[in-house]
Amino acid sequence: MRDLLPTGRPVLVLAPMQDVTDLPFMRIMGRRGGPDVYVTEYFRVHGDSRPEAHILRSVCEHGTGRPVFAQMIGQDIGSLVRTAKELLKYPVAGIDLNLGCPAPVVCRKDAGGGLLRYPERIEAIVGALREAVGEGRFTVKCRLGFDDAEGFGRLLGIFGRHRPDAVTIHARTVRDGYRTPVRPDPVVEAVGELGCPVIANGNVVDVATGLAWLRRSGAAGLMIGRGAIRNPWIFDQLRAAWEGREGPAPTGNDVLEYVQELWDETASCEARFHEVKQVAKMKKYLCYISQGMGGDGMFEHRIRRAETPGEFFGICREYLGHDDAVAVRPPETSTFFCGFGALLEGEAGGG
Ligand SMILES: Cc1cc2nc3c(=O)[nH]c(=O)nc-3n(C[C@H](O)[C@H](O)[C@H](O)COP(=O)(O)O)c2cc1C
């Protein structure tokens, strides 16, 4: 991992997001500067699993020229080791282990965030994967704990013993979900204790929240998820801030072009185009993109009700067909982004 880090500035990673960070999305990010490193949606791993073909396509065909880590979710050690070895035959930069997914169906199987209740099992999995995956190629993405962050010190102990090559911390517990403020203190603790790069994750929505996260945590980089769906220029904007140059300031029409590209790319990746399914797929992106893009919530409300491509694009054009710069930040009251304001407390220009 260290050889993938840019010199002289923090690394920028696109967060893995199920049904979002697929082949079309990676390509579209890449055309707008994109992150330094990508992570796939998770490969589900169990006794009978085979790596999902559509995720493998994102590994092989993204064409961004940037490294991609393949993320796995599961709890069976033999299957995880087998799958890691299989995935390493593809052009992946390395293997990432998911220790944070809060989905009840995943946690019930003691995988993802559910594993955080079983530190002995995490110790065995991380130890086995460390041995199976070559140096520089094994990373972990975790939350702070399941119900609370009491066990986080123990988790750091496991990482200290088995030395993953980087650790990304989504600084919430599984119970916290996605809407609370993130907690910088455990990330500071990890930076102090672990010898590997620690990447801070959660609630970066613009340059100011990204810079505040780094100042508060001392992390080696940022992983950005929802903020990058809403604003695919965010990685270039951060790089511009570090280089002291003017970053991209997208207008409504730039966002409209992005939506059109999402439509075209996702449609072209489907084996069989289906209008209704395509509109439904686009709504998943638009619930993030529409936040703060005008209409006081009406953009999102109307898109939710769109059924045909004509209705969908008519509504998008109504709110995005203009040449004014769009709002940098989503509203703090948005259910899709709330909680980021805490990162800015006490920061110059924050609040
Ligand atoms: C739609 C969606 C899907 C996600 N899927 C994954 C996943 O497959 N693997 C994973 O580790 N995290 C997943 N996450 C969590 C994100 O990677 C990230 O940790 C979280 O969204 C916080 O970062 P953000 O505030 O920048 O979005 C997902 C999040 C969202 C919103």
Image: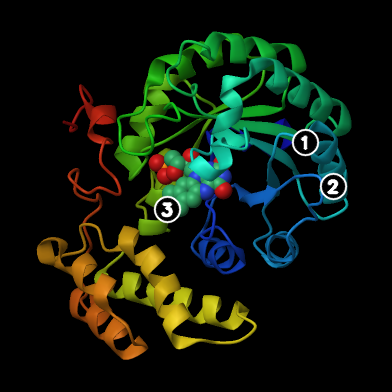
The structure's colour scheme is rainbow
- Quarter of the picture holding the C terminus: top left
- All told, the count of numbered labels is 3
Toward the front, the furthest residue is 108
N-term-proximal mark, 1 vs 2 = 2
**Could you classify mark 2 by the number of other residues whose Cα lies within 10 Å: few (under 14), some (14-19), or many (20 or more)?**
some
Toward the bottom, the furthest residue is 310
Residue at left 15%, top 65%? 294
101 or 285: nearer the viewer: 101
- At label 1, the amino acid type is Arg
Q: Is mark 3 within 8 Å of ligand 1?
A: yes
Give SS at disc 1: loop
**Could you classify mark 1 by the number of other residues whose Cα lies within 10 Å: few (under 14), some (14-19), or many (20 or more)?**
some
CB atoms at circles 3 and 2 under 8 Å apart? no
Q: Is residue 254 above or below residue 291?
A: below
- At label 2, the amino acid type is Leu
Marks 1 and 3, how far apart at CA: 25 Å
Is label 3 or label 2 in front?
2
Locate residue 246, reporting x and y percent: 34, 52
Marks 3 and 2, how far apart at CA: 27 Å
Residue at left 57%, top 69%? 24
CB atoms at circles 1 and 3 under 8 Å apart? no
N-term-proximal mark, 3 vs 2 = 2
Q: Is residue 262 above or below residue 288?
A: below
Give the residue at mark 3: 228
Give the residue at mark 1: 137
Q: Is residue 2 above or below residue 239?
A: above
Is label 1 or label 2 in front?
2
Camera sees residue 23: yes
Q: Which mark is residue 88?
A: 2
Locate residue 278, reporting x and y percent: 46, 79
Give SS at disc 3: helix
